[in-house]
Every structure is written in C-alpha cells, then in structure tokens.
Image (tube, rainbow, N blue to C red):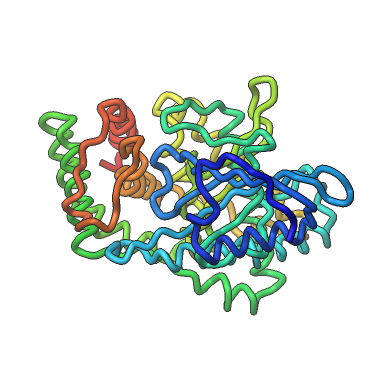
Amino acid sequence: MADIKSNELDVSLESLSKSLQNSIKSIIEKAKYKNYNIAIKHFDTQGNNVFGDPYEIDITGETAEGKKDVNIFVKQQIPQNNFKLLSIKNLYSNEMFIYKDLSKIFASLQDEVNVPREDRYKIPKVYEESDDNAIILENLSKKGFRTYEKLEVVSIKYAQLAVQEMAKFHALNFAVEHKMPDYFNKKMKVLKCDIVFDDDWKGLMRNICAHVASLYDNDVKNRIEKFYSTLIEKLPKYCNDQTTVRCTLIHGDYKKNNLLVRTQDGEVVEIVPIDYQLIHYGCPLFDFFLFIFSSTDRKFRKKHLNDLKEFYFETLSRFLMYFDMDVETVYPKKKFEKDYAERLDFGLMKMLFFSFVIFAPDSGIELGKGPLSELPICPDKKYDDLYRDLIDDFIEWGYL
C-alpha cells in the first residue's frame, strides 16, 4: 500500500461505510499510486437527492508514470426502511443495470454501426467497484459539467440538446429490442414502474391538489379539486400501461436536476443524462412530457413546445437509421401523434406528483419519518407561478 500524505478532509475516509472504504482503496491500488492525498466532500444537491448520500472524492498523487488525478462522484444508498412509495433497493439496482450492463451494450451497438463519436449517446464512466449500495462514477464536474438550479431558466439550445439525448436513449433501447430480443425481454421489458399507488400516495396527491387549488378562485379551483379523482385513477394506469401505447425502456425521471450540462462561451454545448433510478418499460413520450413541464415555463412552451416535439421525432428517426431501422416501423408518426394527444395530461399529473420533491425547500425533505399524506405541502411562494403555468396550459388545451 502506498504512503498516505497528511490532508484536510471535509469528510474522513473512516466515516464512510466499510464497503465504500474498500472500494476507494481498490481504485487507489489499481491506479498504482506511490503516494497520494484524498479529499472527500459532501456534494451539495440543494435538496434534489433524497435517496442517496453524495460525495466528491479527489485522489491526487504520484505514479511511476508521473502525476495522476482521479476524481470520482459517489452516491451511497441511504436506508429508508419506512419509505413505502418506492423500493430504494430497486432504485440502486436499476441504476447499476444501466451503468454496468446496458451501457456496454449501447457502446457495442454504436461501435458496430460506426456512430460518430460526437453523435453517440453519453453515459458517465462507472467504476467496477460500484455495487447496489454505492454507485461510483467519474466526476464530470471536474470537466466543467453542472446541473441547473431549480428556477434557472433553460435556453432553447439546452432544451434541444436534452430532447436529443432523450431520443437517442429511446432509439438505442428500440435497437436492443430489435437486435437482441431475448435480452430485451428478459432484462428490460420486465422493469416495471416501481411507484406504489396506495392510500398514502392518494393522501399526498390530495394535499398537493388542495394547495394548487388554493391558488385560484371559483371555477378553476373547482376544476382542480375535481381533477384529483381523475389523477388518482389515470396516473397509475398510465404508468403501468404496456399495451395501448408504444413502449420501450424509459428514463422515468428526465428533468433538469438529472442532466449534467457543459457550457462554452455561455452557450450549452453538451448534456449528459444521469440518475437512472426510475427506469422502467413505458411510453417514451412520458420522458418528454416530464422534461418539458418540469424544466420550462408557459411562455417557453407557447413558443417552442411543438417544435421540440417534432425535433424529438426527427432525432429518433435519424438515430434509428444508424441501425437500419425505419421509424415508421418502430414508432409510426401517426401512432406517435395519437399517443401524444391522448397522454399529454400525464405531464400535468406526473409534475404534480413530483412537485413535492421538485418544489421542496432547498434543504430538502426527510422521507421515511412518517406517512407521505402527512408531509407538509407548503412550497415556497416562488413556485406558485410554475403551478399556475401548468394549470393554465392544461385549461387552454382542454384537459382541465
């Protein structure tokens, strides 16, 4: 073992779990350091990560070849024994499946058809030392990537790149289904939506709808209160429907805080999706709806929504062509438009559902301390305009 120089730590190595300590030591040994420093810091997610304890770990030192830096990002599982809405264990196994298994298949498929490096779907490098308790990735923040803050305005370029990566992800999953049907059926199609739509969830949604209704008077208030019954009936059906819409493996949580962004001269030039914990077999439009309604405002949608929908379909079509697949065979435009029109209100429903996390205080929320139906729904007033934007859109479009 190499010598460890003295260092100043925000977090000590010894305070981490034993398994994570061993993983870090293994990474150090593989790098063949002669001597090294370790700096460990808690990563501030501004309340966005409620299921993991994130750390930035920087290892610097000397090898036989010279100086070497290893920068890693760790997300360690936080036990949530009393949290019933989702299985925390499944969240981590889902993400490990993407990083350790499916990413290799994506790389192989793109190699086979010579997808240009600049056009490939992007997935962060994962360390083999990762397990279902701790995911260890290359720390892309050291390469200039960051996530947007909750209220940070996205540009049309940001939205285009986000939609582009989304379409590539879906196209690759369609390609796996086409070229590796046994693998797809055994490993991907079996991944179900993990949300438990029980009475506690219904209580949470009742409280959220009541808060949103309180922002209005008279007719609109009544519409929102009535919409609660529609939501608790339709959202579970939408999330579990695998027959009436075209399905593939979807991200399930495609929103701003799960997109790493790199800018150049103030312009967004690259986006890397992360956090695949909610992947499941479902309608790819659901990723599109969640991104649009969680990341843009009403003014942006009035100007760009239809163009972004068309851009998604064009990118899906273009990327499938690498694999000699015709989008009209995979996801015909007529079917795409039908699914879009019939399921657009999923965007409102899922956004209302996720709002207890998205619009939570910057310090985050504590889950597993009691029933979700008793969780205080009192977001900062700064989010009320975003709620109104959603409601006003769906009133205009005839869904409310």
* Residue 384 point in image, percent of width and height: 27, 29
Camera sees residue 113: yes
Q: Nearer the viewer, residue 324 or 355?
A: 355
- Is 375 rendered above or below residue 305? below
Name the foreground residue: 341 vs 351. 351
Residue 335 % position (x, y): 52, 56
Is residue 166 in view?
no
Task: Give the camera-side residue of 224 and 60.
Answer: 60
| Quarter of the figure with residue 268 | top right
**x, y percent for residue 160:** 60, 35
> Viewed as shown, does residue 383 lie left or right of 330?
left
Camera-nearest residue between 298 and 374 = 374
**What is the tally of numbered marks visible in this picture?**
0
Quadrant where the N terminus sits is: bottom right
Q: Residue at x 55, y 61 (%)?
A: 20
Left or right, residue 203 beside residue 291: left
Identity of the residue furthest to the left in this view: 218
Q: Position of residue 52 (x, y in %)?
A: 44, 54
The image quadrant where one finds the C terminus is top left
Give the vertical position of 394 relative to 228 (above or below).
above
Report the residue at 67% width, 67% height from top. 176
Residue at the limit of the structure toward the right, as seen here: 65
Identify the residue at image location x=64%, y=79%: 182
